[in-house]
Amino acid sequence: MSTLEIETQHGLARVDLHCAPEGRAALLLGHGAGGGIGAPDLVAAAQSARRAGVHVALVEQPYRVAGRRAPAPARQLDAAWLAVAEYLGAGVLEGVPMVFGGRSSGARVACRTSEEGGAAAVLCLAFPVHPPGKPEKDRLPELAGVEVPVLVVQGERDPFGQPEPAPHRDVVLLAGDHSLKGDLDGLARAVGEWLERVLRPIT
């Protein structure tokens, strides 16, 4: 593993880079609003991706690097994420397809930036369809706007809701809640199988 610090217009981002021997693609993973890149579901997804021959970049947003708990506004998160993706794509990850992904808030960032960032696919862990108890505050348009293959891995008891499958959107429901800690083996299996499938035509 190597750690990179990348300057963005909203501060310093930090990336833990885990290279795979084959390196046929790269998976960029962002953390949730109040958590970090050590979340169990992110770690399980990262390990599964490396076993599938995919480089993994765990991206820590500038607000977290600066020691703040409260997340930055969406436009700042998106701009910092795109700056990191551009930096990696022009350097250590040059020439390989990039899959954008993340858990919760990080999944929303991945969806919103997928087109501008040229993502080949999007991985959403615990996508927050709506705040708990507030189904009227619907975030599904962010997910529906993604035009590349999407995998959503969601807990069956997630109070943030469950999205439905759709064209080019697979949804895997696992035992557990928003943390996805209830079935990490199932999560890893779903991520690995999906990466194998979506990367086959483009690598």
Image (cartoon, rainbow, N blue to C red):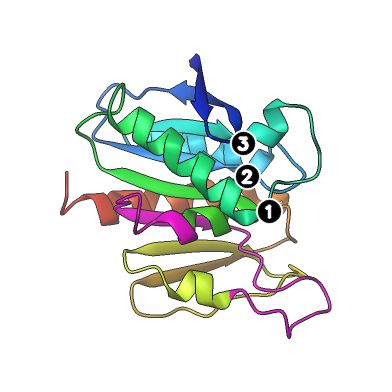
- Residue located farthest toward the top when viewing the structure as drawn: 2
Q: Quadrant of residue 19?
A: top left
Residue 115 included in the magenta stretch of the image: yes
**Which stretch appears magenta?**
111-139
Residue nearest the observer in this picture, 56 or 64 = 64
Tag 2 residue: 41
Give how far apart the Cα atoms at labels 1 and 3 are: 21 Å
**Do residues under tags 1 and 2 come within 8 Å of each other at their CB atoms?**
yes
Taking 115 as reference, is 189 left or right? right
Tag 1 residue: 180
Considering only order in the chain, which callout, 2 or 1, is on the residue closer to the N terminus?
Answer: 2
**Crowdedness of circle 2 by 10 Å Cα count: few (<14), some, many (20+)?**
many
Residue 117 vs 144, above or below: the answer is above
Residue 87 vs 104, above or below: the answer is above
Helix, strand or loop for disc 3: loop
Taking 156 as reference, is 93 left or right? left
Residue 142 percent across, percent down from the top left: 51, 70
Residue 129 included in the magenta stretch of the image: yes
Type of secondary structure dominating the magenta stretch:
loop
User: For the residue marked with disc 1, what is the amino acid?
Assistant: Leu
Considering only order in the chain, which callout, 3 or 2, is on the residue closer to the N terminus?
Answer: 2
Which residue is found at the position 35% from the left and 36% from the top? 86
Which residue is found at the position 70% from the left and 46% from the top? 72
